[in-house]
Image (cartoon, rainbow, N blue to C red):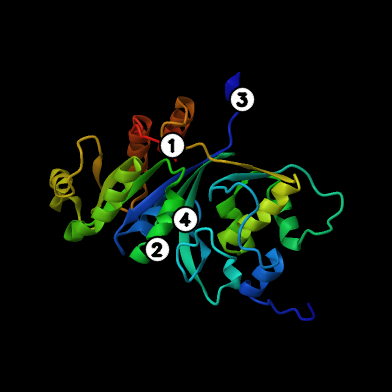
Amino acid sequence: MGTDEDPGPLVRMYAVTGGRARPIGESFDVVAVVTTLGMPQVSVGLSPEHMTVLRLCARPTTVADIGVYLRLPLNITRVLLSDLRREGLVSIDRPAASAGSMNERIYQEVLNGLRTL
Amino acid sequence: MDYARSETLAIKILVAGGFGVGKTTLVSSVSEIQPLHTEELLSDRGTGVDDTSLVEGKATTTVALDFGRITLREGLWIYLFGTPGQDRFWFMWDELSIGALGAVVIADTRRLGEAFPAVDYFEQRDIPFVVAVNCFDGARRHNPAVVRKALALPPHVPVLLSDARERESVKEVLVTLMQHARTHVPAVTAS
C-alpha cells in the first residue's frame, strides 16, 4: 500500500480474507479458545493479521478477544483462524461449558473465584 | 494430581432483557475490562444461513456485540455477552446461545413484558437462567414473588432483586446462576 492511511475496515476485510466470508471446516464458538501450536517455517500466504494472531495466541485467547484485538468483525476473524487451523498452526478448542457438561470441580472453582472477586 | 492439569475454559453467559434495562451496566459492574465491542457482518438478507459470500452482496450490515470478561485464573474465564436488544437481530441469539452455560434475564418492573421474549427463549432452548429484577430505584418497591407470578416462572427459576450498578449485587446474581446451572438437568430431547 502506497500510503500510511488506514484503508478502512471493509477494505482490510477484502485484503485479509481475499473476499472470503466463511471459515473453512468445522465452525467454532465465539468463546472457543485458540492456542498457537507453532510458527510457520515460511510465512508465504500468511497476512500480517495471521502473524498477529499467532503471536497473540502464544497465550490461549478466545475468538472474541482476538476479534477485538484485530479490530475485525468476528466472521472475518473466524476466516483467519480457520486458515491457521488448516495449516496446523493453531488449535481451536470448542467450549464444553454448556450446563450439564461442566464438571463439578470447575463449578466449584468458578463459584470460589466469583465469591473472592 | 489432576488439579495440576488445569483446563482451559471460557464460560459463556448471556445477559438479556429489554432495551435500556441495564444489560451493559450489569456487564460493566463485574467485567475486568470496559465492555468490549465487536461486530458481526451480515448480509442484508439477514440470517446468513449457507449463503453466498457476504462480500459479494450489495450491502452488508453490522451487528454490534458487547461483552465483558472476568478472569478467574489463567485459562479460566467468564464471558458476559449482552444480547442484541432489537428484535430484528433475534437470530444472533441462536449463535450466541449455543454452548452458553446460562443466562441472566434483567427485568424492569415498570415494563415486565419486555422480559417475556428472553424468558421464553431460554425456556425453549433449555438454557438455565435467573431473573434479576433491576432495583436501581431501591429494592423495597419490588417483590420477587410478584415478578415470578407475572412472568409465569416455574419454581426452580431463581428470581433476585439486584442493582446492576453494584458489583457485589451482580456477583451474587452470577453465583446464583452458577448454582442453578450446576443443578440443571437437561431436558430430554428427541433428536
Q: How crowded is mark 4: few (under 14 residues within 10 Å), some or many (20 or more)?
A: many
Q: Earlier in the sequence, mark 4 or mark 3?
A: 3
Mark number displayed over residue A116: 1
Gap in angstroms between the C-alphas marked 2 and 1: 36 Å
Secondary element under disc 2, as helix, strand or loop, is: helix
Q: Do labels 2 and 1 share a chain?
A: no
Determine the residue positioned at 41% across, 58% down: B91
Residue placed at 41% from the left, 54% from the top? B93
Residue behind mark 2: B89
Is disc 1 in the same subunit as disc 3?
no
Residue B175: quadrant of the picture: top left
Along the horizontal axis of the image, is B68 left or right of B119? right
Between label 2 and label 4, give the one nearer the viewer: 2
Q: Which amino acid does label 4 sit on?
A: Phe
Q: Nearer the viewer, mark 3 or mark 2?
A: 2
Q: Mark 4 points at which residue?
A: B67
Instruction: Tell me: B73 left or right of B134.
Output: right
Question: The residue under label 1 is which amino acid type?
Answer: Thr
Q: Please, what is the three-letter code of the amino acid marked with disc 2?
A: Phe
Q: Where is residue B71 in the image (x, y as percent from the top left)?
A: 52, 43
For mark 3, what is the residue?
B4
The image shows residue A94 at horizontal and vertical percentages of 57, 41
